Image (tube, rainbow, N blue to C red):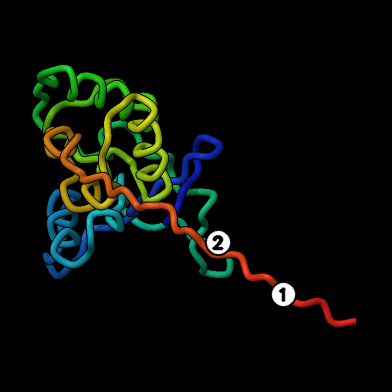
Amino acid sequence: MAREDVPGETRLVAYFTPAGTGLVSDSGNLRTYLRGLLPDYMLPAAYVQLERLPLTPNGKLDRKALPTPDSSAYASRVYEAPVGEVEIKLAALWEDLLQVERVGRHDHFFELGGHSLLAVSLIERMRQADLEADVRVLFGQPTLAQVAASVGTTQQVEVPQAKVPTLKRKRVI
């Protein structure tokens, strides 16, 4: 479900219960399973396992009773510090935009809570910092190191200004 714990910051959160079938028994398995089905930008940022889903007296899901995800609910990767000027600048942009404490080389934009609107915002901030990249790169190569490697490789296309001739019209009265 889409959850907005901080105003203006909506993130996808997967609330789940252990399956009796053994198909998905923990958040790591669920994350792996969904990664095979969904594009990166549609994957939940957090996975919260519950003994059972809270229900209203009518038997519907009680969304207000769902807990706020803690830091363990978010995907974590082994931290490797950013290397080089581009990665360091990019990491600072990600930290500010995604409101996370630190970003490593192998951190995944969408797993940290990024989504399509934040991706566009990131690309704009990158341009302001003289880091040229295409938003499509972020969707196809969403780790910090991959995005940093693509900085400056996008080709700028110069489109000449077209000259439109003016037409002289006869006035009909």
Q: Amino acid at mark 1?
A: Arg
Can the viewer see residue 56 in this picture? Answer: yes
- Give yes or no for contact between labels 1 and 2 (Cβ–Cβ under 8 Å): no
* The quarter of the displayed image where residue 41 is located: bottom left
Q: Please provide percent x and percent y for residue 131.
A: 27, 30
Q: What kind of element bears circle 2?
A: loop
Work out whether residue 135 or residue 78 is closer to the camera in this orientation and state it. Answer: 135
| Left or right relative to 50: residue 171 | right
| Left or right relative to 88: residue 55 | right
Please tell me which of labels 1 and 2 falls first in the chain: 2
Q: Which residue, given by chain and number where applicable, does mark 2 sit on?
A: 56
Q: Which residue, given by chain and number where applicable, does mark 1 sit on?
A: 169
- The residue sitting at the bottom extreme is 172
Identity of the residue drawn at 38% across and 24% down: 96
Identity of the residue drawn at 55% across and 61% down: 56
Near mark 2 (Cα within 10 A), the count class, few <14, some 14-19 or many ≥20, is few
Q: Please provide percent x and percent y for residue 143.
A: 16, 39
Can the viewer see residue 47 in this picture? Answer: no
* The quarter of the displayed image where residue 1 is located: bottom left
